[in-house]
Structure formats: C-alpha cells, structure tokens
Amino acid sequence: MTLDVANVLGIIGTQTITERLDEDEVGFTDLINNIGRLRRTSIISESGLYAALARSSKPAAKDLQRSVALEITNEGGPRMVARRWG
C-alpha cells in the first residue's frame, strides 16, 4: 500500500506520493479497518513503486534502488559480450 511506501521513504501522508505518479500507477480500493470501518486506501503499481524510489533521495530509497537494480541485472543471467574481430 502507498502508506507503507511513504513510511519507508520518510514521507508524511500518501498524497505526496500519489500526486507525483502517473494515473496508471495509482489505484484506490476500499478496505475494512480493524474497528470495522470502511476506508478508501490508495495503492501503487510496481512501476509506481519504482518511480517513487527513483524520485527519492532518502537513504532507504537508495538501498532499495540498489537492490532492485541488482535483481534486474541478475534476472537476465550471464551476458555475452560481442567482440568485433578484424
């Protein structure tokens, strides 16, 4: 949920994040909280998470950016380097 991302990035409230993301990166859903009230909650897509991380300069965001980058580069497996001969 957007609140979790905001907490990790040290941002107070979710509106700051949702205002900066594209329309297709943010969604809303209704959840029932622990005392039975229906609450409208914002959620962000995976691409929205990456966009929020990329815009943040917080240390937690930098650590997550590195982790994501390593995961992406490791997913492709070993890479072959083409060399031009002649």
Image: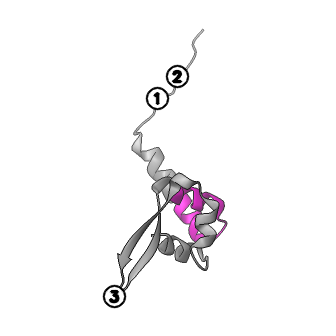
- Proximity of marks 1 and 2: CB atoms separated by less than 8 Å: yes
Query: In percent of the image, x 39 and y 39: which residue is there?
Result: 77
- Mark 3, Cα crowd under 10 Å, few <14 / some 14-19 / many 20+, is few
Query: In percent of the image, x 60 and y 8: which residue is there?
Result: 86
Mark 1 falls on what kind of element?
A: loop
Q: Can you see residue 66?
A: no
Type of amino acid at the residue the image marks with label 2: Ala
Query: In percent of the image, x 60 and y 58: which residue is there?
Result: 21
For the image shown, how many numbered marks are present on the structure? 3
Indicate which disc, 2 or 3, sits on the residue closer to the N terminus.
3
Q: Is residue 76 depicted above or below 2 in this figure?
A: above
Query: In percent of the image, x 58 and y 65: which residue is there?
Result: 18
Q: Which mark is residue 80?
A: 1
Q: Position of residue 80 (x, y in %)?
A: 46, 29
**Residue at numbered disc 2:** 82
63 lies left or right of 55: left
Per the image, is 7 magenta? no
Q: Which mark is residue 72?
A: none
